[in-house]
Every structure is written in structure tokens, then in C-alpha cells.
């Protein structure tokens, strides 16, 4: 017997994960080199040398009792201080260790934030297309998700006017994912300033804080000359959710943080509650070895030019096959317009050519498919013939 509340989750089990499992089955039949799996954002690059050296140092040179023991639920003070100082160096902010909680990845950060903020019946606003887990996580805390429709005409930037219409007194959170999964868009300063103004007006009208959760696991993955706007500069009630899964290629190591703006409302009370929320989530604390390693290589990154080349090569292959796609500005996804209304038909046709993609309906944006290009460039090159065949089915 399972809880009735779990039944919808089983029925709507992750399309992305299902495609990933399908890819493994197909690899056994056709050979891994003949299956072009663009479904999951699982980084294909190795972690940088600095991270591997830091892991070795922590394991071989540091006190084992410190390395493997408990620490404060918010994480090692040395790690939190290093994260705060790194943010301040990069963005001119004024974070301290007291504004940081180390977490088990960005997903854990967002769950801790939601646990701290939501009462049953509260709401969050998300901008389609969006990462589907945002709604699932909110439901953990009996909160509703309000979806702002996609703004295709403006390159999938959020629409501040549509946000304004979506707000009501029950809204406590607005999630911004920048650079965006799945579109690869980087949001402009003008758009984010307008969003900040809309929320400031709503806070005054409703008489309570509305928090922006800025989900930033792709912050370092930028391929164009466009700034990643530091949202705490625009809006006081901002909470950053960050993960090193993408920037260091360590998704299995599960480390992230939440950073609450020092200018946010009742920041000390919020941090105290969030620290408890982190503990009672069952995580207790973030992985100790990974905390100590990451604090020693905060400026390290994976090979960003490699992903940029992947983006350019895949865009060229897909568009030469006749498809229309959004030029990736950041993250590691290509957002491709379906030539048929039901993009699941395109996903099925792509599978016949041994191409695995994710339908846009998985991100509340039908009519598109997502291709993840964080894979070997050789796989992208080998996929060209299959994309050409797929294009001929629709464009002749």
C-alpha cells in the first residue's frame, strides 16, 4: 500500500528519466556508439584537476575525525565563509557565513527554502518552460504552482506583465532559473528589473514578503557576451539556490548551498528556521568531504569552450536538417521547435533514428523538444546523419 498522495507522482513519473532508461536499453541492442542520447543533463566532462586534487588532499592530509564527522547542520563554517567571500569577490555583495547553508545540491536548497516559507495553501509562480520538479517540490509542502505561459516572442524571457496578473496574496515565492533549463536563454537586466518592480509593488499591496528563488546551477555555463545579472542587487528578498553539479561536473557528489540576501526581511529568523528545515529534511548536513574539497577550488570550472563547441555543432546539425532552434546562450540544452503540433510525435520519430529527446510538455511548453548537449562531441558529430533523416521526414 502507498499513500494516495503518491499516486499522481507515479502516473507522471519523470519523462526525462524514462528516456534515459530507454537509452540504456537501446544501447544494448544497437551499441552505445549508435544511440544518440540527448535526454539527460548528465555532465559528460570530467571534474577539473583542481577538484580532484582537493579531494585527494582532504582524504590524505586532513584529520579523519574532522573529514568524516558531524559538523553544524548549516555546514562547515570554513566552507560557508569561503562561499560568502567568493560571492562577494565576484559580485560586490556583503554575504557572510551566517547567510549560507550548505545543502545536498540545488534541489535540496529549494526544498529547504520551501519548507521554511510555505504554509498549506500558499502558492509559487514559475515561468514556462520550467523544470518540472519545482511543482513537485512545492506539493511536498502543500503549496500550489501557478504557471506563467511561455513568452516565445521575446526569446522565452519571463513576461513581467503576465507575472503581475498571476500574483495574489497567497503567492510567497517566484522561481527564476537563469541560465534557463530547457531553453538556454539568459535573462536580460531590463526584464529582471521589471520583475523586481512588479514584486516590490505586490509586497506593498499584500503586506508580506514575496521571495525570489534564483535557481543557478548553470551560472558559469555561458557561451555569449551577456551578463548573468546578480538578482540580489535588484531585489532584497532574494535567495540563491546553487549547485556545483554542472560547473564542476559532480552531480553525484551532491553539494550546493542556499544564500539568503543580507538585505532580506528578518534574515536572522529566516536563517535559523532554514537551518532547522535542513536538519529535519533528513539530510542532516551536506557531504563533509565534498564541502571541504569545494572550498579549496571555488574558482575552478569545467571546460566551458568544450560545451560552447557542442552547442554550436549541434545547432548547426539540427538547423541544417531543417529544424528551427533557439540559439543556446547558456546551460547545456538546445530547444528545438517541433514541425508538428504534438511534439511527442517528433520524439517518437526521433527515437526511430536512435535519437533520444525530451518533449517540451515535460516542461509545460508543448511544441518543442529539448536536446542536452553535455555529451561527447563525437556523439554529436555521429548524430548528423540521423538528424538529416529525421528532417527529411518533415521537410522533404
Image (cartoon, rainbow, N blue to C red):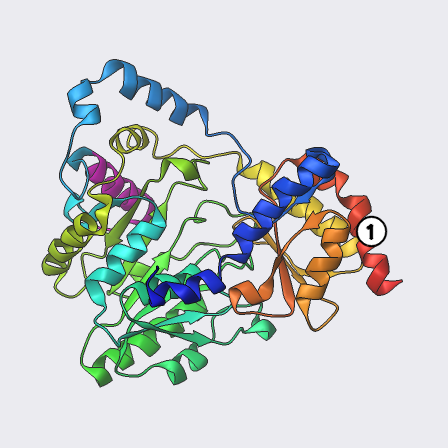
Q: Does residue 89 show up?
A: yes
Mark 1 residue element:
helix
The residue positioned 69% from the left and 59% from the top of the image is: 347
The residue positioned 18% from the left and 33% from the top of the image is: 78
Q: Quadrant of residue 234?
A: bottom left
Please name whichever residue, 380 or 344, is drawn nearer the observer in this view of the structure: 344
Asked whether residue 368 is drawn in magenta, I would say no
Within 10 Å of disc 1 (Cα), the crowding (few <14, some 14-19, many 20+) is: some
User: Left or right: 100 with respect to 240?
Assistant: left
Quadrant of the snapshot with the C terminus = bottom right
**Residue at numbered disc 1:** 388
Please name whichever residue, 151 or 38, is drawn nearer the observer in this view of the structure: 38
Q: Identify whether 192 is placed above or below 33.
A: below
Q: Identify whether 376 is placed above or below 391.
A: above
The residue positioned 32% from the left and 61% from the top of the image is: 213
Quadrant of the snapshot with the N terminus = bottom left
Q: Does residue 225 show up?
A: no
Q: Quadrant of residue 191?
A: bottom left
Taking the view exactly as shown, the residue that stands out farthest to the right is 396
Q: Which residues are magenta?
A: 79-95
Asked whether residue 90 is drawn in magenta, I would say yes
User: Left or right: 174 with respect to 355?
Assistant: left
The residue positioned 30% from the left and 83% from the top of the image is: 168
Residue 356 placed where, x, y %? 66, 50
Amino acid at each position: 500500500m502507498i499513500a494516495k498522495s503518491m499516486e499522481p507522482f507515479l502516473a507522471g513519473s519523470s519523462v526525462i528519466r524514462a528516456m534515459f532508461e530507454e537509452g540504456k536499453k537501446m544501447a544494448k541492442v544497437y551499441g552505445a556508439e549508435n544511440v544518440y542520447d540527448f535526454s539527460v543533463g548528465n555532465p559528460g566532462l570530467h571534474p577539473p584537476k583542481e577538484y580532484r586534487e582537493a579531494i585527494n588532499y582532504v582524504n590524505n592530509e586532513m584529520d579523519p575525525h574532522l573529514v568524516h564527522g558531524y559538523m553544524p547542520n548549516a555546514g562547515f563554517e570554513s566552507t560557508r565563509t569561503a562561499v560568502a567571500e567568493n560571492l562577494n569577490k565576484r559580485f560586490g555583495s556583503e554575504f557572510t557565513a551566517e547567510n549560507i547553508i550548505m545543502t545536498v545540491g540545488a534541489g535540496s536548497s529549494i526544498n529547504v527554502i520551501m519548507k521554511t516559507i510555505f504554509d498549506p495553501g500558499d502558492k509559487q509562480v514559475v515561468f514556462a518552460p520550467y523544470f518540472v520538479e519545482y511543482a513537485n517540490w512545492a506539493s511536498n509542502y502543500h503549496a500550489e504552482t501557478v504557471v506563467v505561459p511561455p513568452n516565445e516572442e521575446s526569446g522565452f524571457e519571463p513576461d513581467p506583465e503576465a507575472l503581475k496578473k498571476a500574483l495574489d496574496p497567497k503567492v510567497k515565492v517566484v522561481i527564476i532559473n537563469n541560465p534557463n533549463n530547457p531553453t538556454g536563454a539568459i535573462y536580460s537586466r531590463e526584464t529582471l528589473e521589471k520583475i523586481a518592480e512588479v514584486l516590490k509593488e505586490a509586497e506593498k499591496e499584500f503586506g508580506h514578503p514575496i521571495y525570489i528563488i534564483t535557481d543557478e546551477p548553470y551560472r558559469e555555463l555561458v557561451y555569449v557576451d551577456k551578463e548573468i545579472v546578480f538578482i540580489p542587487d535588484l531585489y532584497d528578498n532574494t535567495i540563491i539556490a546553487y549547485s556545483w553539479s554542472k560547473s564542476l561536473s559532480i552531480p553525484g557528489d551532491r553539494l550546493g548551498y542556499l544564500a539568503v540576501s543580507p538585505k532580506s526581511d528578518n534574515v536572522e529568523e529566516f536563517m535559523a528556521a532554514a537551518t532547522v528545515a535542513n536538519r529535519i529534511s533528513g539530510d542532516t548536513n551536506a557531504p563533509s568531504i565534498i564541502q571541504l574539497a569545494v572550498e579549496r577550488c571555488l574558482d575552478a570550472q569545467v571546460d566551458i569552450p568544450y560545451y560552447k563547441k557542442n552547442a554550436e555543432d549541434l545547432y548547426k546539425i539540427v538547423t541544417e536538417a531543417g529544424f528551427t532552434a533557439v540559439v543556446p546562450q547558456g546551460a547545456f540544452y538546445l530547444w528545438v521547435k517541433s514541425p508538428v503540433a504534438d511534439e511527442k510525435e517528433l520524439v517518437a520519430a526521433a527515437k526511430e533514428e536512435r535519437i533520444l529527446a525530451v518533449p517540451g510538455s515535460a516542461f509545460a511548453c508543448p511544441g518543442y523538444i529539448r536536446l542536452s548537449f553535455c555529451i561527447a562531441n563525437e556523439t554529436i558529430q555521429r548524430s548528423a546523419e540521423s538528424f538529416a533523416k529525421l528532417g527529411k521526414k518533415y521537410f522533404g
